[in-house]
Amino acid sequence: METGLVFNRHGGVIAWHVPEDRSAGFLPDSPTLWQILWANRVELGGFAHTHPGEGIASPSTTDVTTFAAIELALGKRLVWPILTFAETVYTEWVGPSALAYTVGYKSQAGFELPHELLAKLRDLSR
């Protein structure tokens, strides 16, 4: 089951996102999640989510368009870690086009979520 984590600029937990209607293929739209993002927009660092399975971690087209829409609405760029059970990648906007995101094993700024948070995300996805 896909699981999410809203985190601050320092990698601290703002909120876990584990909606009842999630599935192995998506996290549903959530007004509650948007309220959390908006209320914490000053300290917000990003949103991590899982793609359950052992495969390669990478953003879907839906992920990238969602990242761009959220960043536009908040007026700031975020870090978007994506985890499978095998790896973690960090997705970030590099421009110049609206959907120009890069994927790497570390963020552009060297940011990494603490290993214990990555482990908990994976555990909540099993």
Image: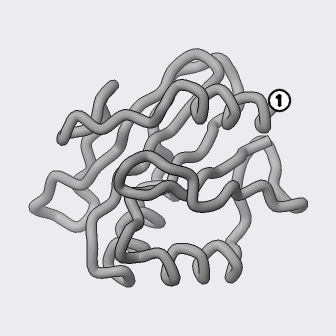
Quarter where residue 98 is shown: bottom left
Q: Nearer the viewer, residue 61 or 28?
A: 28
> Horizontal and vertical percent for residue 96?
10, 61
Give me the residue at 59% from left, 46% from top.
49
Colouring mode (rainbow / by chain / secondary structure / one colour) = one colour
In the image, residue 36 above or below residue 77: below
**In which image quadrant can residue 116 be found?**
top right
Q: Is residue 42 left or right of residue 84?
A: left
Q: Which residue sits at x=33%, y=25%? A: 105
Q: Which residue is mark 1?
A: 126
Image coordinates of residue 117 in percent, x first then y, are 59, 35
Provide the secondary structure element on which disc 1 rests.
loop
Q: Quick one: which residue is furthest to the left in this view?
A: 96
**Front-most of residues 55 and 46:** 46
Residue at the limit of the structure toward the right, as seen here: 20
Quarter of the figure that contains the N terminus = top right
Looking at the picture, how far across and down is residue 83, in whole percent?
Answer: 55, 32
Screen quadrant of the C terminus: top right
Determine whether 15 is above or below 55 in the image.
below
Query: x and y percent of residue 69 in the render?
Result: 40, 74
In the depicted view, which residue is nearer to us: 47 or 93? 47
Crowd class of label 1 (few under 14; some 14 to 19; many from 20; radius 10 Å): few
Is residue 64 shown above or below 54?
Answer: below
Taking the spot 64% from the left edge, 51% from the top edge, the residue there is 4
> Which amino acid lies under the numbered mark 1 shown in the image of this protein?
Arg
Looking at the rendered structure, the number of numbered marks drawn on it comes to: 1
For image coordinates 77% across by 29% down, the residue present is: 123
